[in-house]
Image (spheres, helix red, strand yellow):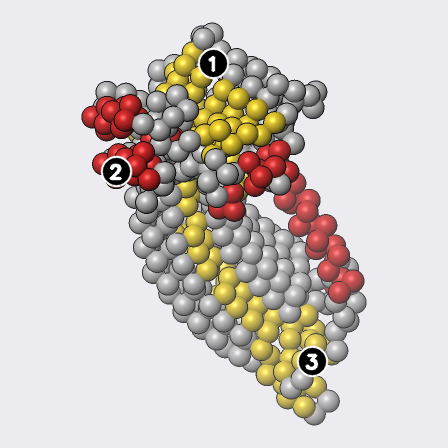
Amino acid sequence: MKQFFRFSFLLLALLLPALATAHDFEVDGIYYNINGNEASVTYKGSDVNDYSYEYSGSVVIPATVTYNGTTYPVTSIGNSAFYECGRLVSIVIPNSVTYIGDWAFAFCEILTRINIPNSVISIGYGAFYECSRLSSINIPNSVTSIGIRAFYQCRKLTSIDIPNSVTEIGEYTFYDCGGLTRIVIPNSVTSIGDYTFAFCMSLTDINIPNSVTDIGEGTFASCTGLTSIVIPNSVTKIASRTFSWCTGLTSIVIPNSVIEIAQEAFTSCTGLTSVNIPNSVAKVGEDAFLNTAWYNNQPNGLVYAGLVAYKYKGIMPSGTSITLREGTRGITSSAFADCGGLTSIVIPNSVTGIGNNAFQFCLGLTSVNIPNSVTSIGSSAFSGCNGLKDVYCYIADLSRVSVGYYLFHLGSWDYSGRTLHVLQGMADAYRADAKWYSYFEQIVDDIFMGDVNGDNEVNIADVNVAIDMILGGNSSTPAADVNGDGEINIADINAVINIILNGTQN
């Protein structure tokens, strides 16, 4: 992966000369462009890749420069100004500079110390990219913006304090800074970008302040020295691959502000033995805990991640029936994929999401009930289920449900003998929705809400069964949640009685 990124960035760098202009003038060996009444330091020669003109040794940039009788303040170091100056040892930047441009010091391999004055407010894209000997840098409080990949692969950088003027740390900013052991993130930061600290293998701990609401994809991926981390309760989602390959991580406490753990979030955290997942989590992505000690130590069978049905572990015996726990909030992508032994599944009316490929190729599954609580069904959730003949869908409002592609797809495209059963009066709505109608020979509205015992009638027998469900004597069914509030309680019994007496749920 690192090689791919390096190639991509090198390619981008090679394209930069096409966008650049030649310098306007030169004074004391430093080349400048004129920007209105100001001067910007630029690269030598007419081509950024002409290394015969590169800067070398120690360079002192003046605060002002005079050309043709006019004095200009030097306010910026332009894009690629010192790009790949492999013999540049040190640089002095004056207090007049407010901006350090994109790729300004990229690939300056022997540049070891640099002081950024407190006049600088912005550090550009890849500004210090692969400054492999850069061991120390001071970022002043004046800086409000640090560009993407600004310190990418500065291998010698050991510690850094981010000033409290910064609100966002961009993507890949400290990617592969292998020597970085310490970093201070101030309370001003609200967002940490994708792969910001990935491959910072010497980083052992980090404090994320409560101001942070967004931690990006792969932010701490392959931080193998990281042993513990506290996720603040300001974070609502742990993104894809955020902690993947953090082999030193042994435990994690996820705050109850988090509602989603994305795919591969902790994959290959081989030392992770303890995971605390709060009930707030309604969605867990595929392979979120793949190859972790926590998952590997789970017994065969259905593994839960908090209130989410995460993965069926091991080989499922033929003729298996599964009733998901009451209160289950979601079914992870591929949770039951290829479980040919699954013949029936009871999904409680607390489940809101069914992930991609959740039941793909469950060849023994003949029928399934989808409760009204479901608001999202992923692509191919039931694809390849050749034996599936009856789908009972209790969703009363299709407009509030996100449905993926190839939901019930069969490779043969032959759906003869397959029936979609929906609530009374809903057949036309399902027939008008291509994500539903194309997978069934017929759609019939033969579900009676309140028909708790499934005998196609709503009567006192349904009241009795509903009471048993509340008392714990029977497993609940979607039809028992008559008022559609996600719970089965006395209000549903009253609703059943109203249907019996008046033909309505009111």
Quadrant where the image shows the N terminus: top right
Seen in the image, is 391 located left or right of residue 485? right
Rendering quarter of residue 125:
bottom right
72 or 197, nearer to the observer = 197
315 or 193, nearer to the observer = 315
Rendering quarter of residue 77:
bottom right
Rendering quarter of residue 29:
bottom right
- Name the element at disc 1: strand
Q: Is residue 145 above or below residue 134?
A: below
Tell me which numbered mark, 2 or 1, is placed earlier along the sequence: 1
Tell me which numbered mark, 3 or 1, is placed earlier along the sequence: 3
Tell me which numbered mark, 2 or 3, is placed earlier along the sequence: 3
The amino acid pointed to by label 2 is Asn
* Distance of label 2 from label 1 (alpha carbons): 34 Å
- Name the element at disc 2: helix
Residue 50, x across and y down, in percent: 77, 59
Disc 2: which residue: 494
* Distance of label 2 from label 3 (alpha carbons): 80 Å
Residue 93, x across and y down, in percent: 54, 71
> In this view of the protein, can residue 98 be seen by the observer?
yes
Disc 1: which residue: 343
Q: Nearer the viewer, mark 2 or mark 1?
A: 2
Q: Which label was assigned to residue 34?
A: 3
The amino acid pointed to by label 1 is Thr
Q: Residues within 10 Å of mark 1 (few under 14, many from 20)?
A: many
Q: Residues within 10 Å of mark 2 (few under 14, many from 20)?
A: some
Residue 284, x across and y down, in percent: 43, 35
